[in-house]
Image (cartoon, grey):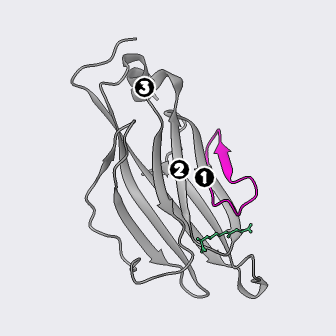
């Protein structure tokens, strides 16, 4: 199928983490439970454009290479430390696009650099084949501790494959 000149398909996505302190059950290896996720910016599950999401956890986790073949694209774990998670989006084969990787740091603790407000809502974009930074937000988890952080990105498919484009618009 041919590619459509002068056409762009823009899909807003959010990747993020949220973490909760486990409270009195905390021990040396488990202080928090947390979830890392990728989803559509409006809550849609993205399975119309994504075939796989891979989350690369810190090597101290058992089986750190976690693969989600269907929505919800998320991993829930427990641990003690903060680290960078590489999140790779693989698109449906009919898109004929390369994977996109987004790095996101798991935050367990509210910090001065993650204020209780969302930063300025300017959008950024990721083009399949090359990622750039997006808009970040964060918040503290309130009583007991915990933290959230997320980044809003736009996946931009420029000159999309026609059959992919038509299928996505029809869904
Ligand atoms: C740090 N550089 O030192 C970071 C690494 C790694 C966190 C944090 C493993 C949990 C488990 C876990 O939480 N690793 O043992 O299953 O802060």
| Badge 1: residue crowd in 10 Å (few <14, some 14–19, many ≥20) | some
Q: Residue at x 69, y 54 (%)?
A: 64
Percent of width and height locating residue 96: 45, 23
Q: Nearer the viewer, mark 2 or mark 3?
A: 2
Residue on which the image places disc 3: 170
Q: Check contact, mark 1 vs mark 3: CB within 8 A.
A: no
Of all residues, the one furthest to the left in this rendering is 6
Q: Which residues are magenta?
A: 56-72
Looking at the image, is mark 1 or mark 2 earlier in the sequence? Answer: 1
Residue that appears at 29% across and 24% down: 159
| Furthest residue in direction top, as rendered | 1
Instruction: Give the mark nearer the N terminus: 1 vs 3.
Output: 1
| Residue holding disc 1 | 56
Task: Tell me which image quadrant ligand 1 sits in.
Answer: bottom right
Q: Which residue is under mark 2? A: 87
Give the structural element (helix, strand or loop) at label 2. strand
Where residue 141 appears, as percent x and y from the top left, is: 54, 79
User: Label 3: how many residues lie within 10 Å, few (<14), some (14-19) or many (20+)?
Assistant: few
- In the image, residue 72 lies at what x, y percent? 61, 48
Q: Which mark is residue 80?
A: none
């Amino acid at each position: 199928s041919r590619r459509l000149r002068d056409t762009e398909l823009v899909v807003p996505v959010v990747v993020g983490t949220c973490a909760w302190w486990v409270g009195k059950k905390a021990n040396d290896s488990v202080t928090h439970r947390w979830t890392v996720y990728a989803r559509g910016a409006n809550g849609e599950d993205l399975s119309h454009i994504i075939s796989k999401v891979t989350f690369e956890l810190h090597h101290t986790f058992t089986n750190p290479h976690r693969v989600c073949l269907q929505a919800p694209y998320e991993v829930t774990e427990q641990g003690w430390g903060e680290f960078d998670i590489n999140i790779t989006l693989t698109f449906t084969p009919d898109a004929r696009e390369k994977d996109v990787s987004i790095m996101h740091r798991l935050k367990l603790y509210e910090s001065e650099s993650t204020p209780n407000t969302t930063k300025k809502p300017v959008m950024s974009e990721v083009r399949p084949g090359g990622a750039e930074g997006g808009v970040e937000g964060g918040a503290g988890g309130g009583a007991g501790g915990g933290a959230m952080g997320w980044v809003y990105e736009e996946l931009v498919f420029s000159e999309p494959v026609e059959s992919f484009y038509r299928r996505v618009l029809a869904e």
